[in-house]
Image (cartoon, helix red, strand yellow):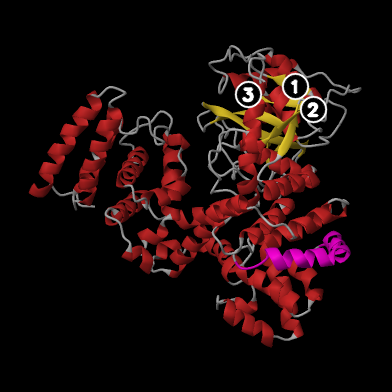
Amino acid sequence: MNTSPPDETIKPILRSFDHVLTQLASASSAGKATYQGRMLDTVKRLLKHPGGLAALETRVEALEQAGIFAGTDWAVPSSLVPGMVGNTLKSTELRTVALECVNLLRFLSVVRGVHSQPRLPVEHARHFLTQVLALNLDRILGAHHEAARVSAGELDAAVDRLLKHILDKVGTEGILGQLVDEVWRIMRQRPIQVDHVKSMILQIAIAMNGDGQSFRASDTRLGADRLISALFGPTDLCREDPGLAVYRDRLNAADTGSLQAEATGMARAMHDTGLVSDYHADFLRFVMETGQGHLLADALGLSSTGLDALRCYQALVQQLIDVAVRPGTAQAVLGIALMLERGILYSPPIGPSLWRLLGAKLTPDCEAGLIAAFGTDPTPHQRLVAGVMMLLGQPLGIGQGNNPTCQSARALSMWALNDPDYLLWQLAQATSNDRIIMHFEGQPLDSGTLPAGLALHTPLDADPVSAVLVPHLDRIYAEMGRRVLGRGEDPHRWINPELHGWWVGREFHIAVDVMTGKLHAYDQFIRDFHIAYHPLHNGNEPVIHPQPAGIAVTDSQGTFVGWHAISIIRVALDQSGMMRVYFFNPNNDSGQDWGHGIVVSTHGNGERLGEASLPFAQFTSRLYIFHDDGLETAMAVPVDDAEVAVIREMAHKSWACNRL
């Protein structure tokens, strides 16, 4: 970056900048927005000047103190998501691009020790910038595709300079390795939505094929190669990513042994990474079209359980593959394989329900919503069937994207896990009638006649089933909330059992007084949770059905962020003998740092696909709502006062510090 004294051409811009900065700093809260816009217009001019980046970097702290982020999504830096920065920097709204640039310089100033943020530790700022750099390697390496160059925006060159400047300051060491580790960490959770992961892997491939030797760290090569090959060349006949047309020619010419190797190789790559190549989808279609169904079980990687289900329901599975599996919906292959492994087809209503789905004609509104989210190819019906396969195979892989709809995502996960018949019925209502009907305290609620809830539009960053059902579920959830207003207690006491299912425990426990927000009978709350869920205190009774619960989410500093809906899946000892709560968090990424040493684990501690976990005491310290079935526990073991005190102290130091 140019650090020489500013030339004469930048001085007028700096004078204008400092003048507007003074106005912004002295503006009232109501008047900030006006001066923020003027300030960002000046920032744009400064960014475009060859020496402007250096000048802007020295003014970042003053900009923040003046209120450049006040009232915006950037106001709380610890809540920002690295994965969203790339799209923001490509926005056609140049003020938004300018604000993101200022934000990145803010994070850089924290990393360099120039500027301190009480709620933005240096290690968090460094991790954030490393992720941003890793996700935007194409810009750093100059690997823009032709369309990007043709449509380059006014600030694109400035943004590229900024990213390279950040790279110079943060360093290249570990960026590729961190990105590879991040992809593996996410994929161990087996999410349904993997487009962002595929983008990361593409960045890895670009970096490893580029000239930057710093991206070729030997300790990451093996993990990176496994990810890249899983997507772009999982088997011998497509190793060099020849394209689907060439691959199909090779399949047509292959002998029996080669096809068998393709089947097992595809399955191995899929189950190893959780990613499905378009070549895998094309291979399955080739197998079905050429009457070689004997290769299907190997291509899906089935155990004896899945193989038995396939043999019993082969016609149905073949039709599901014909409709749902194609390039563009390749992840449905994993969904079908895991659905067969679950054995849910043996439940009498599931087969007929899936045949009904296969023959369904979607309403125009339903089709329009799916097209808005996913486009026209594959067709909305094909996309939806693929989405159902993924959800039934990966019930804990569903997420809410960036939408405030954790209740709805949790409900879909619970139904897919515990009552897939009910899930398919709700979907049939929505696709046939553009409404779903549920009952609350004996009264029908028709989503087609209810006002919008928190999801004002079709979610565009969700899976196909969510795109169809979440708007309906969200309206019903909001209506349930309206009907219990004024009861003086937390509405989830009544909503959770009615929304999620009969298996939700009717005994309701809450850690705070609803009217005051203060802790209420907290020690008893802790004891009740142990008696209800801890195997050493409840006579070793397991969790029979997934149960809704509410947690007080805290950031990496232990500061309260908000309330969040999760599901308790099971409680068990891990391999080290630690009692852990295994739960589902519907936020697309369960691995989080909740502060004070409480870091949510997603693998390595006995977690099954999609589960998160914490030691029992740590989980309890962030819990504020739970249900239990109210059954008497004959062998209840009292909870030691010391154990209660440890949990109470963890809560008092974090989310409950202002609720004593």
Other-residue count near label 1 (Cα within 10 Å), few / some / many at <14 / 14–19 / ≥20: some
Residue 127 visible from this viewpoint: yes
Other-residue count near label 2 (Cα within 10 Å), few / some / many at <14 / 14–19 / ≥20: many
What is the distance, in whole Å, between disc 3 and disc 1 at their CAs? 19 Å
The secondary structure that dominates the magenta segment is helix
Nearer to me, 431 or 543: 431
Q: Earlier in the sequence, mark 3 or mark 1?
A: 3
**Quadrant in the rendering for residue 511:** top right
Q: What element carries label 1?
A: strand
Judge whether residue 316 is colored magenta.
Answer: yes
Q: Is mark 3 on a helix, strand or loop?
A: helix
Other-residue count near label 3 (Cα within 10 Å), few / some / many at <14 / 14–19 / ≥20: few
- Residue for badge 2: 505
- Residue for badge 1: 508
- Residue for badge 3: 482
Indicate left or right for 660 with 165 as reference.
right
Residue type at tag 3: Arg
User: Where's the C terminus, which quadrant?
Assistant: top right
User: Residue at the location (83% across, 66% down)?
Assistant: 314
Tell me whether the residue at label 2 lies in contact with that at label 1, contact meaning CB atoms closer than 8 angstroms: yes
